[in-house]
Image (cartoon, grey):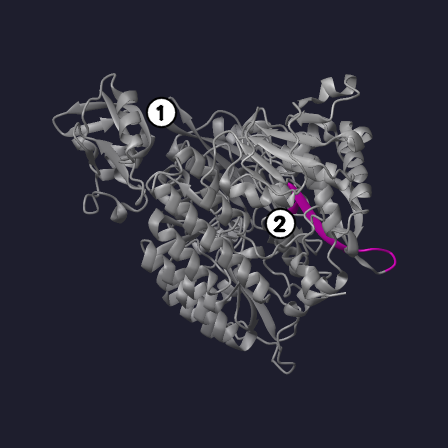
Amino acid sequence: MYKYDEYDQQMVDTRVAEFRDQVRRRISGELTEDQFKPLRLQNGLYLQLHAYMLRVAVPYGTLNSVQMRLLGDIADKYDRGYGHFTTRQNIQYNWIKLDETPDILAELATVEMHAIQTSGNCIRNISSDQFAGAAADEIVDPRPYAELLRQWSSFHPEFLVLPRKFKIAVIASEKDRAAMRLHDIGIKMVKNDAGEIGAQFYAGGGMGRTPMIAPMIRDFVPLDQLITFAEACLRVYNRYGRRDNKYKARIKILVHELGRDEYVRQVEEEFAHLLTQPIEPPLAELERIKAHFTNPAFDAGAPDDLDISDPDFRLWVERNTTAHKAPGYIIATISLKPVGGIPGDATADQIRLMADLGRDYSFDELRVTHSQNIVLPHVKKADLYTVWKALDEAGIGTANIDTVGDIIACPGLDYCSLANARSIPVAQKISERFGSAQKQAEIGELKLKISGCINACGHHHAGHIGILGVDKKGVENYQLSFGGSEGADTSLAKITGPGFDEDGVVDAVEKATQVYLANKQGEERFLDTYRRIGMDPFKEAIYG
Amino acid sequence: MVEVQFRFRDDEAVNDPAITVDAFAEQTNATAVRIEPGDDARDLMPHLDRLALIEVNFPAWTDGRGYSAARILREAGYTGEMRAVGDVVIDMLGHLQRCGFDAFAPDKALNPDDAKNAFARWDNVYQATVVDGRQAIWAKRHPA
Amino acid sequence: MKILTGNDLKSGAVIWWTGVGWSLDVNDSADVADSGAALIAREEGVQNVFAAYVVDGVKDETGVRPAHIKERIRALGPTVRLDLTLKPSDPQAVNWVI
C-alpha cells in the first residue's frame, strides 16, 4: 500500500491548516455562506438535511487497518456512532459540527487520510477496482497509476474550478468492477502488441440526468505521457465545457455536443502542445510508487482447500468470495447489506472489527467497493471460516453479494438535501421481500440500484433493475427501469412505464423476478433474459 | 480603473487601459488587453511581444477559465504583467500565481494578512505548471 | 402559515424561528407571514442562522406541520433511524412524516 513521504504528509497537514483558517474566517463572519460554500465543498463538507456531512476520501478504495480503525473512532467521537460507505469508495458522516471539522481532518492526517476534493467542481477522488492487486484477471495493479493521478490532481491549480465535478476511474482487467465507462474519464491499463503497458482513455461517461457511456478517445497512451494526456483532456474541458447551465456542464455534454471525434481532435492538439512543456513526472516516480504496491508475503505453502461443511458458511463462500491470484488465498467481500438494513452503513464497532480482521487476516489491507461493501483482499483460505464467524457474530456475515439483496442505494430524502424521495426504505423493503437465502439463490445475480433523485448517486441507470425516486406533487413516487449494466458490457437501463408508490415498486420488482424465472434459459442472469426477451413480457406482468 | 493590491514584478506598473480582445485586433498600437472568460486566449498569440499588460477578468471566482487562459499565454512565452481582476478571493491567490498571474486587482480589497498567508501557504506543489517556475514534488524526489 | 427555517452555523442543526429566537422543535414555529425576507436578512446578518428560507406549514392543536415531506423529514430526522430523531421513543413518528 502507498505510504506517504514527508512531502505527502506536508500537503495534507497544510490543507488542514488552510481549512482551519477558512473555518475561523467563516465563524468570525469574514466569509459569508455564499463565499464559504465552494471552499468547504472542496474539502468534502456539505450541508445536508439535518446537519453538516463530511465525506472522507479513500483513494482508490484502499485502506489499512489503522486507517479503518480511525474511521470507526471518528464515528464515535465526532458523529453518532456510524458511517456510510459510498458508491465512490469513500465514507461519509452525517452529523458533523463545523467547528470540529478541522480537528477531524487533523486526526485523519495522522493516518495519511484527508477529505481533499471529495466534493466541489474539481477532480474528485480517483476510484479503482476493489480487487486490485488480488484479482486473478488483472494485467497490472491499477493503483500505482491511480496514485500518480491522485497526486497530480490534488490542488492542481488550473483545474480547481472546473465547469462541474470530474470523476476518474482506473482499472486494469477485462472485467470492469469500477463502472469505468460511466466516469468523466475512464482509464483502462492495457498491454500493446509489443508487450508494453499503457493507458486506454475513455471520456464523457456519466450518470445523472443525461446518462452516457464514455467513448474511447485513445487506445494507448504510453506511461511516460500519462499525466500530459490527462492534462490535455482537462484543459479542453475547462476551457470549453458549458458553464451556462449546471445540468449541461459535465464533460459528457461537451463530448456529446462536439462529437467524440472533434473532442479527440482538440485533445490531441492540446496534447501535442503540452508535450513541449516539461510537466510529466519521470518514470522513476511511477517506479517509486509501484514499489509500494508489491505483493504481500504470501505463504507459498498455504493449503488451497476449503472446508465448507457448515452450510451457512458454504453459502457465504459461494456468494461473497472471488478467486485470488495466489494459491491458498481468496478475496472476501463483506456485505454491508444485512436484510432490512441501510445499504452501506456500518457502526463504529463494525468498522473497528473489520479493521482488526484486515490486520490479522488480510495483510493489513481493506477495500471499499463502489457497491458500498468492504473487501478483505488477501485472506488465507485456512482462515476464512474464522473470519466469517467473526463477521456473522457482528451482523455483517450476510451472504448476498451481487444478488437482489445487495442493493446500492443513495442516502435519499432521509439525509440528502437534493433528494426528491427516500431510497433507503425502498431498499429495506426489497431486501426483506427477498430475504430468504433460497429465494436469493434461485434468482442469482441481480444488481438492483436505487437513487432518490435524478443525480443518480445510486447508479439506477446501471442497475439490472433501477429505481429512481421522484417527487410527484409532494408525494414520493418511484420509476422502474430494466437492463442497465456497469460491467464490461455497460448499458443504460430503460424505463418500464408509469411510476409506483413505495409498496407498488416492491411488488413490481417481485413480478419482474417471476417473469425472469419463468423465462430463464440455462444459466441466464436476469439481465441476460431481459436482453433476450425484451421489455414486453415484463411490462405485461407489471402493468397487465 | 482597477486598483492593483498585490504585484510581484520589479518593472514599472502598466496603467494603460485594457481593451477587449475583439477591439485589440483592430488596435495595432494597444499594449493592454482584457480577457473575458469566453475569449480564446490563443487569439492573442501573434501579438504577445507588443503586450505589456494582460488582464484576465473573473466575473465570478468559481468560473475557472481564466486559469487556463493565463497559463496558455505564459506557455506561449508572454512575460509582461498578467493581472487577475474581478472576483479575486483570498483562497485562490496561490493557485492563480501558479498559473502565471503576477498582479492582483480584486474588486473588493482583501485582508492583507490573510492574503499574505495565502500566497505563502504551499511550500511544495504536486504539479509542474512550468509557468510558476516552481519545482514539483516529483522533481525533488528524483533530482536530475 | 409561513414558517422560517435554517441551520445553526456551528452545529449545522435544523432550527425554526419562534418569533423571538430559534428552536430545534418545529412545533415552536411562529407564523412569519410576509416578514420572512427581512428576518432572514437580519438573522443571517448576525449569524444566528444560515441557509435560511421560508416554507409553508399548517398549525393545529397537535403542533406545526410543514407542507412538504422534505421539511417534515428535516423537522424530525431520518425516518430510517428513528433512534436519532427528535422523537426517538415514538414509533409512530414516521407516520407524521408520510
Looking at the picture, how far across and down is residue B37, in whole percent? 63, 27
- Residue A408 lies left or right of residue C13; in this view the side is right
Numbered tag placed on residue A153 in the rendering? 2
- Residue type at mark 2 is Ser
Residue shown at 80% from the left, 47% from the top: A275
Q: Nearer the viewer, residue A465 or A134?
A: A134
Looking at the picture, how far across and down is residue A74, in whole percent? 37, 59
Q: Nearer the viewer, residue A401 or B3?
A: B3
The residue furthest left is C61
Residue A97 in view: no
Image quarter (top left, top right, bottom left or bottom right) of the N terminus of chain A: bottom right
B128 versus A327 height, above or below: above
Residue B126's quadrant in the figure?
bottom right
- Residue type at mark 1 is Gly
Residue A179 within the segment the image draws in magenta: yes
Residue shown at 70% from the left, 56% from the top: A173
Residue shown at 59% from the left, 28% from the top: A243
Q: In whole angstroms, how far apart are the C-alphas of marks 2 and 1?
A: 41 Å
Looking at the picture, how far across and down is residue C6, in whole percent? 30, 33
Residue A496 within the segment the image draws in magenta: no
- Residue B71 lies left or right of residue A472; in this view the side is right
Q: Which residues are magenta?
A: A176-194
Q: Chain of mark 1?
A: A
Residue C16 in view: yes
Residue designated by label 1: A474
